[in-house]
Structures are given as C-alpha cells and as structure tokens.
Image: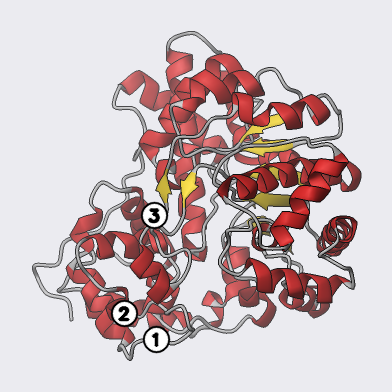
Amino acid sequence: MLNATSRPLVLHQDRLFPSDPTQRAVAQRLYAQVAALPIISPHGHTDPSWWATDAPFANATELLLVPDHYVFRMLYSQGIALDALGIPRADGTRAQVDPREAWRLFARNVHLFRGTPSSLWLNHVFHEVFGLRVRLDAGTADHYYDTITEALQTPAFRPRALFERFNIEVIATTEGPLDSLRHHQAIRDSGWSGRVVTAYRPDPVIDPEHGKFASALERFGQLTGEDVHDWDGYLRAHRNRRAFFKQMGATSTDHGHPSCATADLAPAQARALFGRIVGGRFDAADAELFRAQMLTEMAAMSLDDGLVMQIHPGCFRNHNRGLYERHGRDKGADIPVRTEYVHALKPLLDRFGNAPDFRLILFTLDESTYARELAPLAGHWPCLLLGPAWWFHDAPEGMWRFREQTLSTAGFYNTVGFNDDTRAFLSIPARHDVARRIDCAVLAKLVAEHRIDEDEAAEVATDLAYRLPKEAYRL
C-alpha cells in the first residue's frame, strides 16, 4: 500500500552526461543517434531455458534478486545470510523462505546500493520495464512485489516477449563442455525468430584445480567417445565438443583462468605434463602450466574452426570458503588479483599472434594494466582486441577509466564495444544504456576539446554500440 511519504522514482534524461553544458549538449545529440540501436549481447550467462520454454518468471524475487550476485553480494557484505534471500545451496536445496519476505528484506536494505551501478540498473528496470514511479523502500516493498509479480504472469512479460521488447538482435549464453545444449536445440526447433547462441567454456575439464575436474573429465570422455586420459584423445574430445557447440550457433569460446599465462611446450613435454595431471601426480605449478598450455591449444583450435577466443583472467574465485561450501560457485565472492599480460601471452602470440584469421579478446580485473600492457598489446598485435570494463569495473567510473587509459594507444577500434556479461536478464537494456551514455559522454569531451569532429564522434558511437561487438564476435 502506498502512502503520502512514498518518494518519486525519476530517471533523469541527462543521467551520466557531463555537467558542462557544451559537452552535455553534444552528448545528448550523440546519444539520440544510438539510444534505439538493437542490442548485441555477445557474452553473458543468462539461462537459455528461459527462451526454450518461454515459461513465465515466478515472481520479483526469483527474477531480480536470486540470479544477481551483484545484488546479493552487497546484502551479504552487511551480514544478511544468503539463505534468508532464498539463494540456492550447493546441493541444490534452499532454505524455506517466503519470496515476499526475501523481497521485503531486500527493500529494507536497498539504501546500500546508493551510487552503485546496481542502483542504476535496478531503477532502470523498475521505471522502464515495470512502469513503477515511486522508489523502492520498506514502505513500497509490497507494492513493488505485487506489481512486478502480477506483470510477470502476463504474455507481455514472458521471456520471448521481453527479448523482442528489449530489441535484442542476438544474445550469447555460456555453457560448459558437458552441457547437452538441449535448450538451444529446443529454441531452434520452436521456430521462434529470436537469436540465442551458445559459447564454449571448457574450464571444468581444463583446470586440474577445479573441484569437479576428475568427474568432469570422465563425463567428457563418455560424451565424446574419446580416451580422454590419452593426450591425443583429450585434444580430439575438445575438437569434438567445439564442433558441436559451433553447430549449435557458437561463435566464441571463453576461458576463466586465474592468470593469463600461456605456454608452448614441445609435444613430448605436453604429453608428460598431461600424464601427471590425469594421474593425479601434479602440484600447483603443474596445474598452472597445464592451463597455460591449454590456452595455446585452444588458440590453435580457434585458428582451425574460427571460434573467437576470450580470456577472463585475474580473478580469485570463490574467495569465501565457507560460502563456497554452503552455496557453491559464483555467489559473489570473486576478488580481483594482480594480473600480468606482456610475458604471459608471449608464447601464444609468438605462435599465432600474426595469423590473420585468429581473434583473441582480452579482459582484465586489474586496471593498472590498461595503459601499461593491454592497450599497447592491442595497439600492435592484429589478433588482439580489448573487452570492455568487466565485473567490478562495469560501472560509469570504470568505463571512463577504461576509455581514458586505452584510447591513446589502442584507439576505439581495437576494442569490442560493450558486452554485458550478466546473469540478470532484465538488466541487459539498462547496462547497454549506461555504456552508450558513457561512450557518448567520452566522445562529447573529445568533440568539445576539438580532438574529434562531431560527425566522426557519431560514427564512433554507433560502432561502439552496434557494429564493433557484432564484428568482433563474428555474429
């Protein structure tokens, strides 16, 4: 029930634009040309079952709170247990929590998000998708929950209808090497026109320190019919799965390694290393060397099958051991670590860096590498492109820093524009809107300083929002 104390929710039309009136006017004109462009979402972690079944989302909590670790990690940081929010446990069970009560708990603590990118995204969703015009707080929690949950039961808010409403041209999900891709097949068989593709993420069968490496390797062999305890058979199994993923629409692979280390071992050395890995006789140095060698092997396969290669390194994943044991992976406990690229990538680049058909997209959580390493590398090697500010830096300030530190060496055209890399479906248009506004603000500053003409800035804005991600990911 609303009352007289409910505060209005307003999205200012000039949000994120420069305060300087000359720059703001340029940003407004640039943004007007890109605001309605189709969304290219070439990398992310949305669930393909949403579009395969087109079933209604259950309620506000299941849609906006449970899948979004940006949201529940902030709540957890203030002592709110994930069980109280209905977040699944590692064994697949959940605490018995009324989703309305979980939403009320979120609403009582929504002030924690003031000034964060999550606040920008959530308010965009509330205002633009659900038409809410009062702010979320303890007093409006039930109004929000009821408005959102009731809307989700209508045809206009089914997954496919929202996909079309958001003007998504193509979206890529990310699946592991053991996934059957049955949901992608169901989407194809349904005759629906929305384009949802997959991406190959082989980490569970490449990282010996992954908690499920041994069991995943066994299943990998069963799926492919290869002897995956033999080096040649193991590599054939990867080629087999890559071909299947490509057949199901994949245009890229993704690798979430702790570092960006690559190696180019002699065949006998690689075979011996693999023997230690599958025999369980490896140490941490062997595990790192094997991951490094497999990045080079994946690059060789990319040159053969044309899949674009992505590396998302520099993350200490699942830093909270107790939370990991209780709730499993990807629960907001990832922490950035220092990452080196110049020496780490040299073995791979010496072998494939000049190959005209090879494409490698680099991401980082270590912003100190932007100007020192990543931009100079991408500004030289033909195969390299820079992915956008990612995870902790997917924010207005992070996007500004990324552009400011990479522009002089890599320019705009050695980057891939924007990808949202999210599990939260409804945040996708909000995230792309933020990225477009920030890029227009950056370009407006260049125009105002007479470093670029406005017609050039308009072309760059369009390329960053639409053409570059589409071309970079071969979509």
- Closer to us: 263 or 360: 263
Q: Secondary structure at mark 1?
A: loop
Whether residues under marks 1 and 2 lie with C-beta atoms below 8 angstroms apart, the answer is yes
> Which residue is at 59% across, 44% downward?
285
Using the image, determine if residue 419 lies above or below residue 8.
above
Q: Nearer the viewer, residue 260 or 16?
A: 260
> Where residue 213 sits in the image (x, y, percent)?
64, 66
Q: Is residue 310 visible?
A: yes
Occupied quadrant, residue 348 = top right
- Residue 234's quadrant in the figure? bottom right
Q: Secondary structure at mark 3?
A: helix
Callout 3 crowding tier (Cα within 10 Å): few <14, some 14–19, many ≥20: some
Dot 1, how many residues are within 10 Å of its Cα: few (below 14), some (14-19), or many (20+)? Answer: some
Q: Which residue is mark 1?
A: 94
What number is the disc on residue 121? 3
**Cα distance in 3D space between marks 2 and 3:** 24 Å
Q: Position of residue 298 (x, y in %)?
A: 78, 46
Question: CA gap, disc 3 to disc 1?
Answer: 27 Å
Closer to the camera: disc 3 or disc 1?
1
- The residue identified by callout 2 is 83
Placement of 120 over or under 131, stated as above or below: above
| Pointer 3 or 1: first along the chain | 1
